[in-house]
Amino acid sequence: MKCNLDGEFSKGELQRFGNLEVSPSAGVLNYGQGLFEGMKAYRKQDGKTILLFRPEENANRMRFGADRMCMPAPTVEQFIEAVKATVLANKRWIPPPGKGSLYIRPLLMGTGAVLGLAPAPEYTFLVYVSPVGNYFKEGVAPINLIVESEFHRATPGGTGGVKTIGNYAAVLKAQSIAKAKGYSDVLYLDCVYKRFLEEVSSCNIFIVKDNVISTPEIKGTILPGITRKSIIDVARTQGFQVEERNVTVDELLEADEVFCTGTAVVVSPVGSITYKGKRVSYGEGSFGPVSEKVYTVLTSLQMGLSEDNMNWTVNLS
Ligand code: PMP
């Protein structure tokens, strides 16, 4: 689907996956005008019904991000229709129940040519998909994170709160250094005080202490994760106290359980944190009781194994 800067997106069409043709001076290539979303479709036990999870949340997050990046965005209806059409056209690639999911990547970018620094004159919105299994090589086994003291992912007033492509370019260096040392990923701190937790390269972070769940509040420097928001609701309906606030690195090191949330990682238990050369371990090589509870409730709902009393799933067949 294409659109001018002040226009509306035209009706889209299905196309075979392939390369795009864009101008070398496209806004996305030169000035980083790109935004994406990450979603998953699961096949239900009946083998036929396909479930999407809260697609209007992704549509709205893209619209919010588009405003920050000076881009026009598809309407919520256009976004969801494009996602549904792409998923249904690729239904045969959706793994059987329990064997994975179809990862969905909606992408919005400035494809119009622009030489001086300015928003591009034309935009493209597209959706592509790929079957996926687990995100971390550990599967749902605990991951090992290193707290990053040198690199930052986002600054106050920057673009950390939206899902723009440049945020991911910013983490590649820290992430590759961490992976080369054997860590699963990097946990970032705020760049002002360097003591408050922000998030991991592609997921949000939670700690549990004495059965109280805490997660960094949304202040524009971390992505407002849809899994994060859903886990907060799930945890509260399960009777847990959940706090969205500044969480210090000291609290992290003292926590009973630590876990990450995201569309790709779902809920991943954290087995160890390394900070300034000191390694702290959590649990016995598996989920802690609180993270296991919220993981089970959320994934049962996403995969259609339990009644969707939150009204979060959308059925396609
Ligand atoms: N933070 C970052 C930086 C991410 O890339 C993601 C993945 N989209 C998340 C958090 C989690 O967001 P969500 O739960 O919506 O996938």
Image (cartoon, helix red, strand yellow):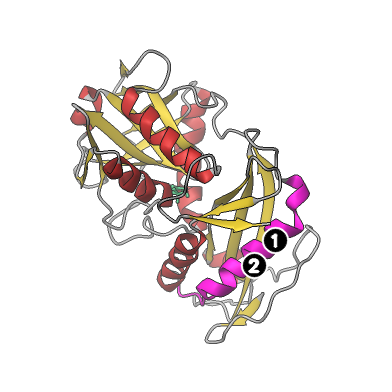
Disc 1 secondary structure class: helix
Foreground of the two, 134 or 312: 312
Question: Magenta span has 85?
Answer: yes
Residue 173 at least partly seen: no
Marks 1 and 2 close (CB-CB < 8 Å): yes
What is the x, y in percent for residue 302?
51, 45
Is residue 275 left or right of 110 when viewed as pictured? left
- Location of residue 284 with respect to 62 vertically, above or below: above
Question: Magenta span has 107?
Answer: no
Q: Residue flagged by tag 1: what amino acid is it?
A: Thr
Q: Residues within 10 Å of mark 1 (few under 14, many from 20)?
A: many
> In the rendering, which numbered label is found on residue 37?
none
What is the x, y in percent for residue 154?
35, 51
Residue 313 at least partly seen: yes
Which residue is disc 1 drawn over? 86
Foreground of the two, 43 or 144: 43
